Image: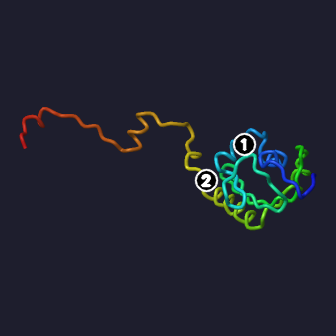
Amino acid sequence: MSDASSGMRLDKWLWAARFYKTRALAVEEINLGRVRVGGQPVKPARDVKVGELLTIRTGAVTREVEVKGLSAQRGPAPQAQLLYAETSASITAREAAAEARRLAPEPAAAIEQGRPTKQDRRRLADWERWSVSVDDLDDPG
């Protein structure tokens, strides 16, 4: 871990803290606005310092973490977890979201054989075929 008074690039810190597999992915996510420092959108080259609050969104999960340390190199996961501390509010919100996803599964997951055929769609909609008969043509009204 480096000196706490100096900062390091945000994209490099996110990579070292193992939020993203590559720095290129970290840069892409920062540019898409999925990483914020103090609630503000930032650029990848912005210096991040110990004590700053980051909001990181990966997929459906949003984490709020406080920077606890800086590291110039990517290490094993237990070492990377020492670089940050997730806030208690973030942990609570993340667990509640996971529970909500567990209780309300994706509706598309129930489909077993994929897209319905035309015949299946007709059956699902209870659609009745109609045709014009000779009797209908003779009756003007």
Image: 6 above or below 127: below
Of mark 2 and mark 1, the one earlier in the sequence is: 1
Query: Which of 89/106 is in front?
Result: 89
Q: Residue at x 72, y 43 (%)?
A: 27
Residue at 16% x, 33% y is 133
Res 54 → quadrant: bottom right
- Residue on which disc 1 sits: 27
Front-lying residue, 47 or 102: 47
Check contact, mark 2 vs mark 1: CB within 8 A.
no
Q: Amino acid at mark 1?
A: Val
Q: Quadrant of the C terminus?
A: top left
Pointer 2 residue: 105
Residue situated in front as seen by the camera: 87 or 42: 42
Labels 2, 1: front one: 1
Q: Position of residue 51 (x, y in %)?
A: 83, 62
Label 2 neighbourhood size at 10 Å, few (<14), some (14-19), many (20+)? few
Q: Residues within 10 Å of mark 1 (few under 14, many from 20)?
A: many
At which x and y percent is residue 110?
Answer: 57, 46
